[in-house]
Amino acid sequence: MKYTLIRRNRSLRTTSNHEFVSWMRKNDLQQWTNNQDFMKGYSKRKSTFEGLEIRFDNEQNFVDDLQKNNLLKIESSKGLFGLF
């Protein structure tokens, strides 16, 4: 699957929401101990500055809400073995 952060135009090919959120956490300006702390902080920033509500109880809900708020697009892999 190809995960694309729409506003930043940055993408990652991965097979799980957990790996995607870990990638987001590692590329954030702040340092976070784990995905749970990152998702909570990210959600608070989006709520404070943009009025968006993003659940942070687990990676699935977090990713679902990123998509609902047009922050993330997920595309299925195409072609031979998902490489293209």
Image (tube, rainbow, N blue to C red):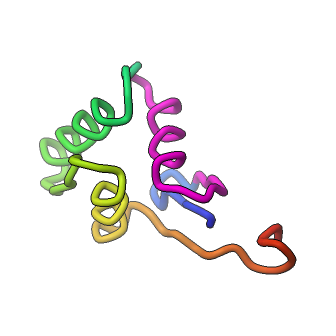
Horizontal and vertical percent position of residue 84: 82, 72
Residue 22, magenta (yes or no): yes
Identified at 59% across, 51% down, the residue is 10
The vertical placement of 68 against 3, above or below, is below
Pick the front one: 67 or 6: 67
Relative to 19, is 26 above or below? above
Q: Is 41 within the magenta?
A: no
Residue displayed at 38% across by 27% down = 34
Count of picture labels: 0
Horizontally, residue 20 falls left or right of residue 82, namely left
Residue furthest right as drawn? 80
For the point 52% across and 69% down, the residue is 74
Residue farthest along the bottom direction in this orientation: 79
Q: Which quadrant of the figure contains the N terminus?
A: bottom right
x, y percent for residue 2: 62, 64
The residue depicted at 21 percent of the width and 47 percent of the height is 57
Horizontally, residue 48 falls left or right of residue 46, namely: left
Q: Is residue 55 left or right of residue 68?
A: left
- Specify the segment rendered in magenta: 10-30
* Vertical arrangement, residue 9 with respect to residue 81, above or below: above
Q: Quadrant of residue 36?
A: top left
Q: Residue 19, position in %: x, y?
A: 53, 46
51 or 2, nearer to the observer: 2
